[in-house]
Amino acid sequence: FAASEVAGARFRRASGLDGFPVLLPTRESPLRRELDRWFAENGVRPDVRAEFDDSAAMYEMAASGAGAAPVLSPLLAGVRERYGLRPLPVRTGVQAELFV
């Protein structure tokens, strides 16, 4: 997910996330490890702008236009509504456990 101006102006379907500005969880996060694995397997080298321990802070930065942020499926509607983010046409198939 990304702010509309980032998604509309910068995202190109042909190159996907390669070189695209992204915000990611820290390397200690299981989601980050799965994303890193997916990036490596698919030859994707995103432009990592920042790493976060707190997903709410990551979504706030995405809403400010700093880059795209990964969102787990159960959170999609809430993140879209609360932060005004727009989905990018990228599906990684990455799965992570969500503890509430």
Image (spheres, rainbow, N blue to C red):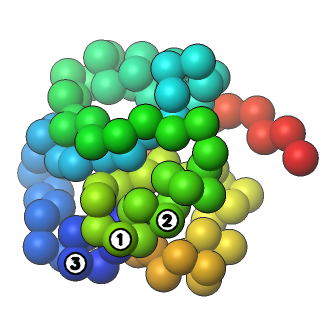
**Closer to the N terminus: mark 1 or mark 3?**
3
- Pointer 1 residue: 64
Residue at 60% x, 50% y: name it: 55
Q: Is residue 39 above or below residue 89?
A: above
**Place of residue 7 in the rendered image (x, y in percent of width and height, measured from the top left):** 25, 69
Residue at 43% x, 52% y: name it: 69
Q: Is residue 73 left or right of residue 64?
A: right
Q: Is residue 9 left or right of residue 50?
A: left
| Kind of residue at disc 2 | Glu
Helix, strand or loop at mark 3: helix
- Which label lies toward us, 1 or 3? 1
- Pointer 2 residue: 60
Residue at 38% x, 45% y: name it: 23
| Kind of residue at disc 3 | Glu
- Pointer 3 residue: 5
| Kind of residue at disc 1 | Ser
Asked whether the residues under the numbered discs 1 and 3 touch, taking CB atoms below 8 Å apart as contact, a structural biologist would say no
Asked whether the residues under the numbered discs 1 and 2 touch, taking CB atoms below 8 Å apart as contact, a structural biologist would say yes
